Image: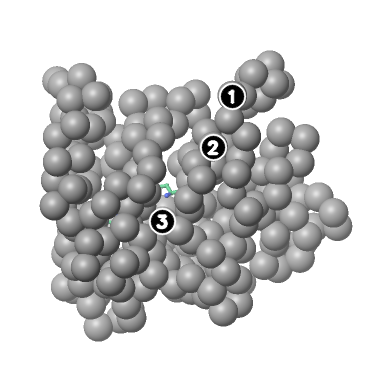
Amino acid sequence: MSKKFRKKLKFKPRIKEVEFIRGRIYTHNLIKGNRVYGEKLIENGRLREWVPSRSKIGAAIMRGIKNLGIKKGSKVLYLGAASGTTASHVSDIVGKEGAVFCIDIAYRVVRDLVLVCEKRKNMFPLLADASHPETYKAFFPTVDVVYEDVASKNQAEILIRNCDLFLKPNGWAIIAVKARSIDVTKKPQQVFNEIEKKFKKHFIIIEKTKLEPFEKDHMFYIMKKIN
Ligand SMILES: C[S@@+](CC[C@H](N)C(=O)[O-])C[C@H]1O[C@@H](n2cnc3c(N)ncnc32)[C@H](O)[C@@H]1O
């Protein structure tokens, strides 16, 4: 993100789980001095920069969301964890009492994810297809938060199915919706309107934000499960 944009940023990060220092956001490093994706470390490695152009949760925080749902001690099911870039910041936030259950379908990225999880004892990797949560039902407990960052046509159905099986009553369902993965022929706003209708049958939308300038045609939803 350019200095010019950072100066112009209308919203200021309001999430107390992150530190906001000179226009950048940081998480408290679970392992002092540990770097996961080449991010900057400050304060003797105690704080790790969360790069919003590399992470949709980071982008949503920079956009000024007020609710994150993820807190110290949270158990999080993370769908589409890739090599663990964002998941590592979630791991920082939930801390030693929390857990991040990381799922990805691609062997290539899970190989790198495993290396991150070996160091971070609150992260647990699984190679699986998030469209079929019944295949991993036995491996994970119920959770406080389900977060999905899977660029696929059936993003809404994946979230709903996983929340049915894993999310506690009143738990948080968070998703970065990529309009172009759902339907390239429709305007992004139309895709968001349609997906919201689906969400509203299962969740209460607490907050939503676009992710520009970090990600184009994405909407980030923070929702609570209807019991
Ligand atoms: C945009 S990347 C995730 C980036 C990651 N969340 C981050 O911020 O560091 C999307 C990931 O979803 C994974 N994916 C796509 N379809 C999936 C599925 N059906 N089940 C699980 N993972 C899937 C891809 O392999 C890819 O790693």
- Residue 148 vs residue 48: left or right? left
Residue 178 is tagged as none
Q: Which residue is mark 1?
A: 10
Q: Is residue 36 visible?
A: no
Q: Can you tell which quarter of the image residue 80 is in?
A: bottom left
Nearer the N terminus, badge 3 or badge 2?
A: 2
Q: CA distance from mark 3 to mark 1?
A: 29 Å
Query: Looking at this view, is 50 or 135 the one in front?
Result: 50
The residue under the point 66% across, 24% down is 6
Q: Can you tell which quarter of the image residue 144 is in?
A: bottom left
Q: Which residue is mark 3?
A: 81
Q: Amino acid at mark 2?
A: Gly
Circle 1/circle 2 CB separation < 8 Å: yes
Secondary structure beneath dot 2 equals loop
| Disc 3 packing (10 Å; few <14; some 14–19; many ≥20) | many
Q: Amino acid at mark 1?
A: Lys
Q: Is mark 3 within 8 Å of ligand 1?
A: yes
Q: CA distance from mark 1 to mark 2?
A: 8 Å
Q: Amino acid at mark 3?
A: Ala
The residue under the point 77% across, 35% down is 22
Q: Position of residue 217 (x, y in %)?
A: 34, 26
Q: Which residue is mark 2?
A: 64
- Residue 112 vs residue 207: left or right? right
Nearer the N terminus, badge 3 or badge 1?
A: 1
